[in-house]
Amino acid sequence: MKKLLLMLGVFAFVAVADGQPAPRPVQITADSITRAGASIQLRGNVRITDGSSVIAADSAEVPGTPGNSPSIDVSGNVHITFDGSRPALINGR
């Protein structure tokens, strides 16, 4: 399985502040990882984790838009698992 390790402080789930722990790296794995222009496409058994929360999906894309906050578009069977120690706020429309 190919592995892509992204060390993105702005994407990490832990904020850096005085006295706070350093951000955890975001680890991304997938069966297939390819570049399409500036974007990265991930296919098959995509798993994104910061060590405590996990996003699993059939596929994902990391758009290569310079200057914007990092984002990941996931699709297919998407499952999100939290470690339970963080509060969750769910808003309906």
Image: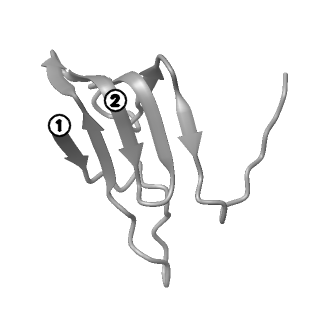
User: Which residue bears the numbered disc 1?
Assistant: 1
- Residue 80's spot in the image, x, y percent? 56, 39
The answer to whether the residues at label 2 and label 1 have Cβ atoms under 8 Å apart is yes
- Which residue appears farthest toward the bottom when viewing the image? 19
- Residue 62's spot in the image, x, y percent? 32, 27
Q: Is disc 2 placed on a helix, strand or loop?
A: strand
State left or right for residue 76 relative to residue 36: right
Q: Residue at x 18, y 26 (%)?
A: 33
**Badge 1 amino acid:** Met
User: Which residue bears the numbered disc 2?
Assistant: 45
- Residue 90's spot in the image, x, y percent? 79, 39
Task: Characterize the local packing of mark 2: few (<14), some (14-19) or many (20 or more) Cα atoms within 10 angstroms.
Answer: some
Task: Characterize the local packing of mark 1: few (<14), some (14-19) or many (20 or more) Cα atoms within 10 angstroms.
Answer: few
**Badge 2 amino acid:** Asn
Screen quadrant of the C terminus: top right
Q: Earlier in the sequence, mark 2 or mark 1?
A: 1
Q: Residue at x 57, y 46 (%)?
A: 81
